[in-house]
């Protein structure tokens, strides 16, 4: 029973803490530009509220006594050397403030009262809201009614505030730290829009009647321009414009069509569980959509571009707008060209068999190599008198051989040579070698299938020689294995006169091996896998 009472007391104390305004600190920011007649009165009202510990007036390049009057009234004053705009003054004040709640008030309010300031702050203090903005009775609201509200109704119809440009508002610092504050008169509506999109709790507080200094028509024109720019910028940033403009919709549909066409072609050749019928259907739908919308895009783009002056700036904008279509089109063309390059004619049959390159990632990098792309290789004829095979460098790396090494194919010894310039992916084989390997001129061999083709062929591989042995050549006989071979290798070190001259990774099994010197069999050794430390 006692522990229940303790929990109840703790709950009561926590509720009291939430409702106690002294637990959250408050800073008031007052941007001021030539407001010497009213700024001291505004500061005085704010200072009369004892829970507000920080009042900052940002003197935005005033040419009158605004700064001095604010200082005399007890505010901290920060001076801008020149006028930067209301938003810039608010940003300066915010950066130099410390309160958990930040309140922004205009400096030209004639009849501001303590209760009005309280009404702005208390909903945040009590946890009722994250942001408060004000509405009040006034003589004029031309920018709000003729500019802000129509645009907001169009782009942000969910916002239903009576006065979205009230000028007096408060917000939690944690929220303000996450958003971009505008430098001009768009700062008010920018905060409202960001709060709406971020799902913050915004409350519009009625503070009665406020008397402002009425702005001139020229000043209202500046305010309206800055408000419009902010609303349109936010609408663009939050995807409200791209959802409604015709050209943007056509571009998206064109990209959809090109993507479906590419997906269908890819499915036909590379996705086994997708049937041919479904692949052709997807690709056909994509082509139809792409053809339909490319006509619309060409028409509207021509009309738009023809009305401009054709300057480089407009051309860059045009290309930037259409770059997604260009990239998607290039992807489709690359896929089609790859397929066309894989067409084979066999009697009355046309066969399309695309062969892809082989991406290799090395688990144990050698020579600082971690990744490589190899193949495919096209088979060509090599009808020279000498038994020579021309192999690309990539294929040679896959076979783990070097130029100058030899391969025995059908009992004939073929020397491995480089390919000629311009034939980097062409493998030239004499007719005898092609017949044994089962290859024809024009066939394409993937890098992954290369070792399978040369599986169990005997090769003579030159080993690197170290030390002062310029007249010494060491070769080893190896049996080429397929990619799926799991035979493990053993390091074989070769010594001459007790000095190591070479080393290799030998595939040794139980049996006898011949050692040749100058082409003559010199010694036969018997290898025992159970005695791997033996020296021969």
Image (cartoon, grey):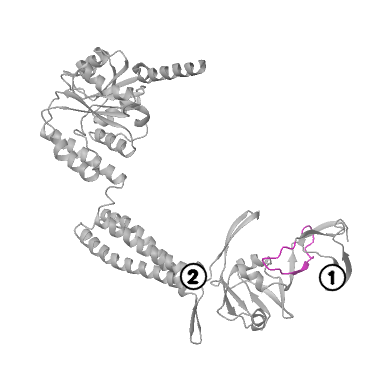
Badge number at residue 500: none
Q: Which residue is mark 1?
A: 516
Q: Is 521 above or below relative to 89?
A: below
Question: Is residue 6 visible in this depiction of the protein?
Answer: yes
Q: Which residues are magenta?
A: 466-487
Occupied quadrant, residue 506: bottom right
Q: Secondary structure at mark 2?
A: helix
Pair 1/2: label in front: 2
Characterize the magenta stretch by its predominant secondary structure. loop
Which of the image's four quarters has the C terminus? Answer: bottom right
In this view of the protein, can residue 182 be seen by the observer? no
> Is 409 positioned to the left or the right of 492 in the image?
left
The vertical placement of 165 against 260, above or below, is above
Queried whether the magenta region covers residue 484, the answer comes back as yes
Residue 487, x across and y down, in percent: 74, 63
Q: Residue tagged by mark 2?
A: 269
Corner quadrant of residue 333: bottom left
Rendering coords of residue 214 (x, y %): 12, 28
Label whose residue precedes the other's in the sequence (1 or 2) = 2
Question: Residue 442: percent from the left, percent from the top?
Answer: 55, 79
In the image, is residue 107 above or below residue 457? above
Total numbered badges shown on the rendered structure: 2
C-alpha separation, residue under disc 1 versus residue under disc 2: 51 Å
Whole-percent x, y for residue 280 in the image: 41, 71
Give the image quarter of residue 519: bottom right
């Amino acid at each position: 029973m006692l522990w229940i009472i303790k929990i109840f007391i703790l709950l009561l104390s926590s509720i009291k803490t939430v409702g106690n305004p002294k637990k959250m600190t408050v800073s008031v920011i007052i941007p001021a530009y030539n407001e010497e007649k009213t700024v001291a009165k505004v500061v005085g009202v704010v200072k009369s509220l004892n829970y507000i510990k920080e009042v900052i007036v940002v003197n935005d390049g005033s040419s009158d006594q605004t700064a001095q009057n604010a200082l005399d009234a007890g505010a901290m004053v920060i001076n801008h050397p020149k006028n930067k705009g209301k938003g810039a003054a608010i940003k300066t004040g915010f950066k130099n403030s410390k309160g958990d709640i930040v309140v922004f008030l205009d400096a030209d309010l004639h009849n501001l009262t303590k209760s009005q300031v309280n009404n702005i702050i208390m909903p945040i203090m009590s946890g009722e809201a994250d942001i408060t903005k004000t509405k009040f009775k006034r003589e004029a609201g031309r920018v709000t009614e003729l500019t802000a509200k129509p645009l907001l109704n169009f782009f942000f119809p969910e916002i239903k505030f009576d006065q979205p440009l009230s000028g007096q508002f408060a917000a939690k610092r944690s929220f303000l730290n996450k958003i971009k504050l505008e430098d001009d008169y768009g700062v008010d509506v920018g905060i409202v829009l960001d709060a709406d999109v971020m799902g913050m709790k915004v409350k519009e507080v009625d503070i009665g009647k406020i008397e402002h200094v009425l702005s001139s028509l020229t000043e209202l024109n500046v305010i309206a321009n800055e408000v419009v720019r902010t609303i349109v910028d936010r609408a663009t940033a939050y995807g409200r414009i791209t959802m409604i403009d015709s050209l943007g919709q056509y571009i998206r549909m064109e990209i959809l069509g090109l993507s479906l066409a590419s997906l269908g072609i890819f499915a036909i050749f590379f996705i086994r569980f997708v049937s041919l019928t479904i692949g052709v259907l997807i690709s056909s739908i994509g082509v139809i959509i792409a053809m339909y919308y490319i006509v619309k895009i060409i028409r509207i783009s021509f009309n738009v571009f023809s009305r401009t002056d054709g300057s480089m700036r407009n051309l860059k904008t045009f290309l930037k707008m259409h770059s997604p279509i260009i990239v998607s089109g290039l992807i489709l063309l690359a896929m089609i060209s790859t397929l066309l390059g894989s067409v084979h004619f066999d009697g009355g049959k046309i066969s399309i068999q695309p062969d892809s390159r082989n991406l290799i990632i090395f688990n144990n990098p050698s020579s600082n190599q971690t990744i490589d792309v190899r193949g495919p290789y096209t088979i060509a004829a090599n009808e020279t008198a000498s038994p020579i095979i021309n192999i690309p460098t990539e294929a040679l790396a896959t076979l783990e051989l070097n130029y100058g090494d030899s391969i025995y194919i059908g009992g004939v010894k073929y020397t491995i040579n480089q390919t000629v310039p311009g034939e980097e992916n062409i493998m030239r084989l004499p007719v005898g070698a092609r017949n044994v390997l089962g290859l024809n001129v024009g066939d394409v061999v993937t890098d992954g299938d290369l070792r399978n083709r040369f599986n169990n062929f005997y090769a003579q591989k030159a080993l690197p020689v170290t030390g002062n042995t310029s007249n010494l050549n060491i070769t080893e006989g190896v049996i080429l294995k397929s990619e799926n071979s799991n035979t493990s290798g053993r390091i074989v070190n070769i010594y001459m006169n007790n000095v190591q001259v070479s080393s290799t990774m030998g595939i040794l099994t139980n049996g006898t091996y011949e050692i040749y010197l100058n082409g003559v069999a010199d010694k036969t050794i018997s290898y025992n896998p159970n005695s791997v430390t033996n020296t021969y």
